[in-house]
Image (cartoon, rainbow, N blue to C red):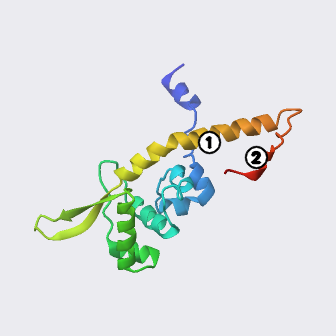
Amino acid sequence: MTEQNQSETATPPKKPRRSANADKWGAKVMEQGFCMIPSLLLRAQRRLHLNPSQLAVLLQIIDHWWDAARKPYPSKKELSSRLGISERQVQRYITDLENEGLLRRQERYGDHGGRQTNMYDLQGLVDKLAEIEPEFREARELARKSRKAAASPGWRPKKKTGADKDGPS
């Protein structure tokens, strides 16, 4: 085959594939950016002692964490504006998150020596999620085995004994 024939029989260029997220949310929405968070953070909200407002502040901070090596540093004013709460309330929630060990504030200063927005180290959150992950994995595996057993022919739930009915003592 000549070069000309080879180029004529080459496969046409592929159309860009839409991402699963673009399929769900729409390409225009996804063009505005997205934030990747582990599902475990949402599933473990209560376990991490996060009320909905604290979680919202934490998610807003995470939205600024684009690179593992670069800690996020959104201003309280921006967080306040995004959430529709006062800067003072944002500050309280950040203190709560810090007291829970989920983040650590680090002061930042510019070249001129002036104070800039705090930087937030989220390693505490990362460590806490890594610590509880095995328990969530085990619970998920037990639930999967239970569903599989229930789907088996002839399966019957175990009858509760008197001790089971009374509950824990």
In the displayed structure, would residue 16 be above or below residue 32? above
Hey, what amino acid is under mark 1? Answer: Ala
The tag on residue 115 is none
Q: Badge 2: few (under 14), some or many (20 or more) residues near its Cα, within 10 Å?
A: few
**Residue placed at 45% from the left, 43% from the top?**
131
Q: Badge 1: few (under 14), some or many (20 or more) residues near its Cα, within 10 Å?
A: few
Q: Is residue 99 left or right of residue 145?
A: left
**Residue placed at 48% from the left, 58% from the top?**
34
Q: Is residue 153 left or right of residue 52?
A: right
The tag on residue 164 is 2
Please name which of the two marks, 1 or 2, marks the residue nearer to the observer. 2
Local secondary structure at mark 2: helix
In the picture as drawn, the residue positioned furthest to the top comes out as 1
Front-lying residue, 84 or 101: 101
Residue 86, percent from left and from top: 39, 80
Front-lying residue, 78 or 30: 78
